[in-house]
Amino acid sequence: MTSATTQQPRHLLSLLDLTPAELHSIIDRAIELKALLRSGELHESLKNRTLGMIFEKSSTRTRVSFEAGMTQLGGKAIFLSPRDTQLGRGEPIEDTARVLSRMVDCIMVRTYEQSDLALFAAHSRVPVINALTDLFHPLQLLADIQTWFEHRGDIKGKTVLWVGDGNNMCHSYINAARQFDFRLRIACPEGFDPDPAILASAKNHCEIIRDSLAAAEGVDLVVTDVWASMGQEDEQAKREVAFANYQVNDILMEQADNDALFMHCLPAHRGEEVTASVIDREDSVVWEEAENRMHSQKALLEFLING
Ligand code: CP
Ligand code: NVA
């Protein structure tokens, strides 16, 4: 750590930890950093800074985007797996947070319980980032909103359709609807609704519509995610039955606006929540979404570490 921290650090445990103005400035900065990288200009705003990365669940995009992003900004990222840290052998979360945050400048955590993440943040001297919990996935929303802005401009007032499970991604879309002021239709089967308190917090922005085809009518953006998230693997068969009418396919996309985009945080299960034909459509922006994880997280790291 480069300086002793006296005041409480800012964290990103959910999208609600930042103001709408801060979120917009991170999106703008992400677009700038993307252009800067493409121009070949060196931009080492986090030189000699270190990001600690605790992964209690698998990852491809999150890990690589943070590692590559820190390299590009002149810093370094350290991958920490519970398999070979003392956290995995029962060292308390609080103690791990106290120790790591005396050595590194920012820590991202991918874990199960939001309460474990909050506990970690409460004992950290440096900013803590939610890199996915069972409840939220705010980093994916930074990338998704950046991708929307790049293609279509402001998302304020647009209508987004979430199809599938009321899961961590859905919860972050609900928060994003509040923060970026768009309308969110949620097409999910009964029994798989988003958390009622999270939904109620955004009741002016969100509605549940059980019929996915009716819900898709005229929407500007269609988004989905896997039917069984990490940790729910043993529910796969049951969920395939429950979600059978909630697949994003060409028929559903036909209901959407002519200019509608398709997004998916990935990894995707082709033939389940989305058909291969939709992922490969021209209006599918899933690869840019994945790339934008890196640009938006660089902007977030600059904001949290440099202020
Ligand atoms: N979308 C996303 O978070 O991907 P990973 O699980 O590969 O990090
Ligand atoms: N809902 C998924 C998102 C993966 C990026 C999960 O939690 O597994």
Image (spheres, helix red, strand yellow):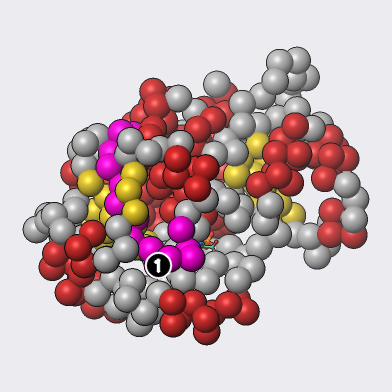
Q: Nearer the viewer, residue 107 or 135?
A: 135
- Reply above or below: 295 against 7: below
For this orientation, the residue located farthest to the left is 258
Image point 42% across, 59% down: which residue? 265
The residue range painted magenta reads: 180-193
Image point 70% across, 20% down: which residue? 8
Query: Quadrant of residue 108 in the image?
Result: top right
| Residue 66 pos. (x, y %) | 56, 49
- Residue 236 in sight here: yes
- In the shown orientation, is residue 28 left or right of residue 86? left
Q: Secondary structure at mark 1?
A: loop
Q: Nearer the viewer, residue 223 or 302?
A: 223
Report which residue position mark 1 lands on.
189
- Residue 142 in sight here: no
Image point 54% across, 67% down: which residue? 229
- In the shown orientation, is residue 72 left or right of residue 212? right
- Reply above or below: 238 against 117: below
**185 in the magenta segment:** yes
